[in-house]
C-alpha cells in the first residue's frame, strides 16, 4: 500500500531558521571577514555576497572519541602486495585512514569551514549598528509627505469608499435578525389558512381573521428596511507619514592636480559606502556629482571618478554650485539631502573662510548630514580648521574625518555614522 | 512471457511512479518482504538539502548545527562536488521516502525499490528496530520536541537553550541505553506526564542533595559510605537528567529529548552495513526481476547498473578516494554471497557454513536480516570468498613499535582473524571510548567522577576537554575523568582545570 504525494510546492526553506542561528552564532567571525572584504574589494564588486571561512577548530561539535596511539587494528580493503606477518614502515603524515569511520560522522578533520553569505547579508553585516544621524529625528518631526494605505473596514467614511459586499452582507444579517419571528408566525398562519380552506371552507370568519393576520405580518416584514444607514461599511484608508522616500546625495570631490588616482579611489569607496547605505533607507535616491579644481562642474559618475584635471583648488566653487542645485531642484520639504565631500585638504588659503560661511549659512540648515573626509597622511591645512568651526555650529549633522589608506575607510565610515545614543 | 515495458523515456510522471511502485511492490510481495505502508514524497533539490541538513529527521528543533550542515550541503551541491543522495528514508509508520524531482524515471524506480521495499522491510523486520524504536510514534514525538524547545526559547532565551543543546549534543552518543529496553516513546504520554515528572523529579533530586544528615547516618564514616551511583552508569545523559543538582525542570526535559532522539538513532548506527546492504541487495534483485519480466527496457537497465555500480564502488586503501570500507559494498557483497552459499555452495562453503549451505536462500537472508546487527552479522556470515573478493587485510598500529604490522590477509590462515577484527571494528562499544559515571561526591564538593576504561591503551581524542566543559555546564560542579588501563590509573582530566602543583599524586593532563 503506497501513497505518492507531491510535496514540491511545500516550503523549501525549512532550514532558514537553522541557517540564521548559525550566522547568529558566528557573527564575530563573519563580521571580521566582512570588514576585511570591504578593505580589500574593488568598488564595482561591492554588490556581491562574500565567502566566509571559519577555522574548523572553532566550529567543531566536540564528541568523545579515541585519539591516536595505543594499539589499534584496522581492516582495509584492496590489498596488493602485503603478506601476513609483514612489517611495513609507517607512512608519513596522513596515516593510513586511521579512524576514518569516526571522522566522517562528526565532520572533524575539516581544516576550514567555508560558506557563502548573500549580498543582502553581506551588507547587513557591513552596516550593522550604523544609522544615519538625524534620520530618526526627521521621522518624528518633519512629516511632510504621506502615503495612504488600506487599513481594514470602518462604519464611517466617504460615500465613494463604500464597500458594497460588506454593506449588503450586514444589511442581510440585520433583515434576518429583525424579521425572523414575524416570518415564523407568517408561516404558521399560512399553514393555518390552508388547513381552514381545506377542512372548514365554510368557517369564513376564521378564514378572514387569519387572512387579516397574514396581511399584518407581511406588512411588518415589509417595513424592515432593505438598507439602513447602520449597515453601511466603508473601506478605511489611513495616511502613513512617509518622510523617508526620497533622498539626494551630493558627492563633492577635489580633482585638482594634487589628487592622485589612489586618493580618488579611496574617496570613491567612501562615496559608494554612503550610497549603499542610503539605498537601504530610502526608496529613491538621486546622486549629484560635483567635481572642482578652481571652478566646479556637475558631471556624470564616469567623469567624476576617472577624468584627469590639473590646476589649483577653490573649494567654495563646489559648495556654491551645490547650494544652487539644491535651491533649483531639491526643495527641502520633499528631499532628504546628504552630502559627502572628499579632498586632500589643499585649498587656496583665502578661500577657506568663504567655504565656512557658505556652509554655515546656506547649506547646513537644509541638509540632513554633511560629511567631510580628508584623504591625506599630511598635516591638516586651513580648510580643516575652518571646518572645525562648522562642526561646532552643527555638531549633530556635520562630521569630518581623516583617511590615510583604503583600509581606514570602513572604521572611519562607521565612526561617522555610528549609531548615536538618543541625545 | 515478454510484456510491454512500463516506460521507455527518461521523464517521470506520477502515473509512472505509481505503476513502478505497484509492480515493484508485487514482486516484493512474492519474496515475502514485510513492510510498513509507504508514503512516497516527491520533493525538489532544495527540499532535499533541507531534509539532509536535519540529519534525516522530518521535523527537527532549531539548532545552529543543522544550519551548519545545511550550509556545507548547499555549498557542495552548488559547486557540483557532490550529487545529493537520491533517497532519504525515515523509519516511521507509514515509512516516508523522498524522491527528488530532478531524477530520471529509472532513478525513481531504483529509489522505490531501495527505500520503500529494502529499507522499509529492514526497519520493520530487524530486531534492534523492533525492540528499540517505535515507528508509529516518532513523528508525533518530534513534533512535541520541536514545540517544547521553541517554547523554552521564548521563555528562557535562545542562548540559554542553545548552550544547553550544545552540551547535550556533545554527549549524545552517551545518551543511549545499550542493554536495557527503553519504554516506547509517545508524544501524548510525554505531554501528559511532563508536568508530573517535573515536580516528581525535582523532589527526588532535592532528597538526594539534602544536606542535613539523617539520624541513622551518624555512625557512617565517609569511607564506608557507598558510592553513588552504586553501579557505574553508561547512560550519562540519563544520569544527568535524573541527578544533576542544578538543572531546572525544563533543562531536564531538554536533556531527555536529546536522549530520546539519540536512542531512536542508535539502531541505525549499529546496522549501517546490514541496512544498506539489505536495501542494495533488494533493489538489485527487484529491478532485475522487473527486467526478466520484460517490464523495463535495456536502456533502463544500463542506467540502473551504472548507478548501482557507483554506489557499491570500493576504492582500495591506497586510492585518493579511500575513506574506509563502503558499507554498501560490504553489505551488498555479503547478502549476495549468502544467497550464493545457499544456492550453489562450494566445498569451502560447506566447511565454513554447514548450517546454511544449500538451505533456502530467502529464509536464510531474512533470518540474517532479522536477528543480527553489524557486529554479529559479520562475525556470523562474512565468508572467505567475500574476504578474498574485497582483498581485506589488517594493519596493526602499535605506538610502541616502530613499524606497522600486517597480522592477517585474505588467505587460509587469515580468514578467521580478519572476520573477528572486522566485526570488532563495527562494534560501537569498541569504536567509542568506554566511559561511565563512576561516583559523585555527595557529601563533599559534589564533584562528578567518570571512568574511562582504556582498551589496548587507546587514549582519548583531543576534543575531550571541550566535551568535559559541556559536561561541567550540565553538572554544575567539578568534573573528573579518570582513564584506566586495567587497574592502573593512566591520566585524569579535570574540569575546571587544576593547577599541577596541587596534585602530586596524579598525572594531570589538561
Image: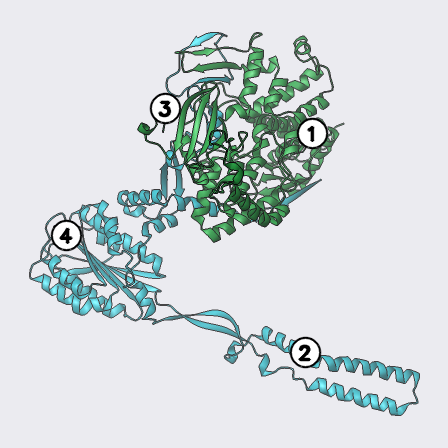
Q: CA distance from mark 2 to mark 4?
A: 81 Å
Q: Residues within 10 Å of mark 4 (few under 14, many from 20)?
A: many
Chain identity of mark 4: A
Residue A307: where, in percent of width, then height?
Answer: 19, 51
Do the residues at discs 1 and 2 belong to one chain?
no
Residue B387: where, in percent of width, then height?
Answer: 57, 14
Q: Quadrant of the C terminus of chain B?
A: top left
Chain identity of mark 3: B
**Residue B302 visible in image:** no
* Chain drawn green in the picture: B
Do the residues at discs 1 and 3 belong to one chain?
yes
In this view of the protein, which residue sits in the foreground, B500 or A176?
A: B500
Numbered tag placed on residue B505 in the rendering: 3
Q: Which residue in the protein does label 4 denote?
A: A344
Marks 4 and 3: which is nearer the front? 3
Marks 2 and 4: which is nearer the front? 2
Which element is circle 3 on? Answer: loop
Which element is circle 1 on? Answer: helix
Amino acid at each position: 500500500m503506497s501513497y505518492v504525494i507531491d510535496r514540491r510546492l511545500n516550503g523549501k526553506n525549512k532550514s532558514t531558521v537553522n541557517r540564521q542561528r548559525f550566522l547568529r552564532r558566528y557573527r564575530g567571525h563573519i563580521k571580521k571577514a566582512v570588514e576585511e572584504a570591504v578593505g580589500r574589494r574593488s568598488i564595482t564588486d561591492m554588490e556581491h555576497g562574500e565567502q566566509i571561512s571559519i577555522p574548523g577548530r572553532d566550529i567543531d561539535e566536540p564528541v568523545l572519541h579515541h585519539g591516536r596511539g595505543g594499539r589499534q587494528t584496522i581492516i582495509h580493503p584492496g590489498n596488493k602486495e602485503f603478506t601476513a606477518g609483514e612489517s611495513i614502515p609507517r607512512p608519513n603524515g596522513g596515516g593510513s585512514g586511521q579512524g576514518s569511520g569516526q571522522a566522517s560522522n562528526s565532520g572533524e578533520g575539516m581544516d576550514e569551514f567555508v560558506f557563502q553569505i548573500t549580498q543582502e547579508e553581506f551588507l547587513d553585516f557591513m552596516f550593522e549598528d550604523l544609522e544615519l544621524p538625524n534620520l530618526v529625528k526627521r521621522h518624528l518631526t518633519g512629516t511632510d509627505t504621506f502615503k495612504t494605505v488600506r487599513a481594514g473596514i470602518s462604519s464611517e467614511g466617504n460615500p465613494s469608499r463604500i464597500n458594497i459586499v460588506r454593506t449588503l452582507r450586514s444589511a442581510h444579517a440585520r433583515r434576518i435578525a429583525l424579521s425572523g419571528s414575524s416570518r415564523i408566525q407568517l408561516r404558521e398562519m399560512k399553514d393555518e389558512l390552508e388547513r381552514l380552506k381545506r377542512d372548514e371552507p365554510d368557517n369564513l370568519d376564521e378564514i378572514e381573521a387569519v387572512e387579516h393576520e397574514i396581511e399584518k405580518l407581511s406588512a411588518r416584514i415589509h417595513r424592515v428596511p432593505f438598507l439602513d444607514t447602520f449597515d453601511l461599511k466603508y473601506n478605511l484608508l489611513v495616511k502613513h507619514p512617509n518622510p523617508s522616500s526620497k533622498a539626494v546625495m551630493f558627492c563633492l570631490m577635489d580633482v585638482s592636480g594634487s589628487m592622485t588616482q589612489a586618493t580618488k579611489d579611496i574617496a570613491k569607496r567612501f562615496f559608494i559606502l554612503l550610497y549603499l547605505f542610503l539605498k537601504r533607507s530610502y526608496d529613491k535616491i538621486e546622486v549629484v556629482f560635483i567635481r572642482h579644481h578652481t571652478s566646479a562642474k556637475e558631471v556624470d559618475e564616469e567623469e567624476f571618478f576617472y577624468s584627469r584635471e590639473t590646476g589649483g583648488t577653490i573649494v567654495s566653487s563646489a559648495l556654491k554650485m551645490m547650494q544652487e542645485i539644491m535651491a533649483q531642484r531639491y526643495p527641502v520639504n520633499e528631499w532628504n539631502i546628504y552630502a559627502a565631500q572628499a579632498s586632500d585638504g589643499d585649498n587656496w588659503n583665502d578661500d577657506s573662510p568663504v567655504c565656512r560661511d557658505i556652509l554655515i549659512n546656506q547649506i547646513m540648515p537644509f541638509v540632513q548630514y554633511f560629511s567631510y573626509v580628508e584623504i591625506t597622511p599630511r598635516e591638516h591645512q586651513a580648510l580643516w580648521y575652518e571646518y572645525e568651526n562648522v562642526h561646532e555650529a552643527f555638531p549633530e549633522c556635520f562630521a569630518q574625518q581623516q583617511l590615510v589608506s583604503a583600509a581606514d575607510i570602513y572604521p572611519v565610515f562607521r565612526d561617522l555614522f555610528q549609531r548615536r545614543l538618543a541625545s | 512471457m515478454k510484456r510491454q515495458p512500463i516506460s521507455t523515456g527518461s521523464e517521470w510522471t506520477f502515473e509512472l511512479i505509481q505503476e513502478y511502485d505497484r509492480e515493484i511492490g508485487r514482486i516484493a510481495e512474492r519474496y515475502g518482504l514485510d513492510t510498513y505502508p509507504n508514503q512516497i514524497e516527491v520533493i525538489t533539490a532544495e527540499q532535499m538539502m533541507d531534509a539532509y541538513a536535519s540529519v534525516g529527521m522530518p521535523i527537527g528543533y532549531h539548532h545552529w548545527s543543522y544550519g551548519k550542515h545545511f550550509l556545507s550541503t548547499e555549498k557542495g551541491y552548488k559547486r557540483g562536488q557532490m550529487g545529493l543522495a537520491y533517497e532519504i528514508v525515515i523509519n516511521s509508520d507509514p515509512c516516508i521516502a523522498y524522491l527528488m524531482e530532478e531524477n530520471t524515471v529509472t532513478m525513481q524506480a531504483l529509489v522505490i525499490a531501495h527505500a520503500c521495499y529494502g529499507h522499509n522491510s529492514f526497519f520493520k523486520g530487524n530486531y534492534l528496530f523492533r525492540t528499540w524504536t517505535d515507528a508509529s510514534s516518532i513523528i508525533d514525538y518530534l513534533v512535541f520536541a520541536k514545540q517544547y524547545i521553541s517554547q523554552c526559547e521564548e521563555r528562557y532565551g535562545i542562548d540559554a537553550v542553545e548552550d544547553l543543546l550544545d552540551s547535550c549534543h556533545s554527549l549524545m552518543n552517551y545518551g543511549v541505553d545499550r542493554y536495557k529496553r527503553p519504554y516506547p516513546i509517545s508524544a501524548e504520554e510525554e505531554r501528559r506526564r511532563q508536568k508530573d515528572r517535573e515536580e516528581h523529579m525535582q523532589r527526588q533530586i532535592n532528597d538526594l542533595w539534602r544536606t542535613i544528615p539523617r539520624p541513622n547516618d551518624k555512625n557512617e564514616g565517609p569511607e564506608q559510605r557507598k558510592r553513588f551511583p552504586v553501579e557505574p552508569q553508561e547512560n550519562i545523559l540519563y544520569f544527568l537528567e535524573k541527578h544533576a543538582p542544578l538543572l531546572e525542570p525544563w533543562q531536564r526535559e531538554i536533556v531527555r529529548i536529546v536522549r530520546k532522539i539519540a536512542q531512536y538513532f542508535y539502531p541505525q548506527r549499529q546496522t549501517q552495513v546490514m541496512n544498506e546492504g539489505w536495501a542494495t541487495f533488494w533493489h538489485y534483485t527487484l529491478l532485475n526481476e522487473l527486467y526478466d519480466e520484460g517490464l523495463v527496457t535495456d536502456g533502463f537497465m544500463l542506467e540502473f547498473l551504472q548507478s548501482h555500480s557507483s554506489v557499491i564502488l570500493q576504492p582500495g586503501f591506497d586510492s585518493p578516494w579511500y575513506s574506509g570500507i563502503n558499507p554498501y559494498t560490504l553489505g551488498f557483497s555479503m547478502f549476495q554471497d549468502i544467497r550464493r552459499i545457499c544456492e550453489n555452495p562450494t566445498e569451502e562453503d560447506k566447511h565454513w557454513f554447514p548450517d546454511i549451505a544449500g538451505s533456502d536462500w530467502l529464509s536464510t537472508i531474512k533470518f540474517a536480516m532479522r536477528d543480527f546487527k553489524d557486529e554479529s552479522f559479520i562475525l556470523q556470515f562474512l565468508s572467505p570468498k567475500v574476504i578474498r573478493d574485497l582483498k581485506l587485510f589488517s594493519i596493526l598500529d602499535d605506538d610502541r613499535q616502530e613499524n606497522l604490522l600486517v597480522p592477517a590477509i585474505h588467505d587460509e590462515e587469515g580468514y578467521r582473524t580478519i572476520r573477528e577484527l572486522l566485526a570488532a571494528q563495527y562494534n560501537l562499544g569498541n569504536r567509542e571510548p568506554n566511559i561511565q559515571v563512576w561516583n559523585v561526591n555527595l557529601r563533599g564538593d559534589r564533584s562528578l567522577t567518570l571512568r574511562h576504561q582504556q582498551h589496548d591503551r587507546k587514549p582519548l581524542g583531543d576534543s575531550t576537554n571541550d566535551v568535559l566543559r559541556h559536561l561541567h555546564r550540565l553538572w554544575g560542579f567539578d568534573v573528573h575523568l579518570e582513564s584506566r588501563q586495567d587497574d592502573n590509573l593512566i591520566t585524569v582530566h579535570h574540569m575546571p582545570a587544576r593547577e599541577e602543583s596541587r596534585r602530586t599524586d596524579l598525572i594531570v593532563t589538561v
